[in-house]
Amino acid sequence: MKSFFEGIADLFVNVLFAPLDFLRFTDSWALANILNWIFMLIGSVAFVYWMLELKKYNEKGEEDKSSTSHSYL
């Protein structure tokens, strides 16, 4: 069983994370942080999309805003 987990560790360290090791040792700050910028861009696009969807839903006025809709209100 120990060799199974060592095989998984070897797969991740030596194969799947090899491109990240290349980025880590570059001299360019922007290239080293390219994954961070990609994730921030994806998160920003998702946030804007979600806010636009909430705005569309709010403008339709379909939500029940009466005080009897939930017992805790």
Image: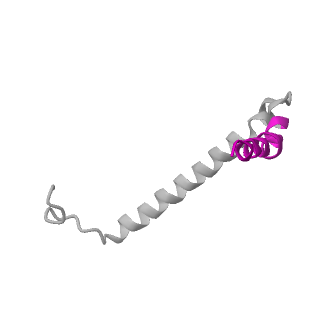
Residue at x-position 56% and y-position 55% = 46
Query: Residue 12: which quarter of the image?
Result: top right
Q: Which region shows up in magenta?
A: 1-22
Q: Is residue 20 above or below residue 43?
A: above
Left or right: residue 49 versus residue 20 is left
Q: Main secondary structure of the magenta part?
A: helix
Q: Is residue 47 above or below residue 25?
A: below
Q: Residue furthest front?
A: 1
Task: State the count of labels.
Answer: 0
User: What kind of colouring is applied to the model shown?
Assistant: one colour
Residue at x-position 29% and y-position 68% = 63
Query: Residue 22: which quarter of the image?
Result: top right
Q: Nearer the viewer, residue 37 or 52?
A: 37
Q: Nearer the viewer, residue 32 or 8?
A: 8
Q: Nearer the viewer, residue 36 or 1?
A: 1
Q: Position of residue 45 (x, y in %)?
A: 59, 54
Q: Nearer the viewer, residue 16 or 49?
A: 16
Reply yes or no: does residue 34 show up in magenta: no
Quadrant, the C terminus: bottom left
Reply yes or no: does residue 4 show up in magenta: yes
Residue at x-position 82% and y-position 45% = 15
Q: Position of residue 49 (x, y in %)?
A: 53, 59
Q: Position of residue 34 (x, y in %)?
A: 75, 40
Left or right: residue 25 versus residue 40 is right
Left or right: residue 60 versus residue 2 is left
Residue at x-position 22% and y-position 64% = 65
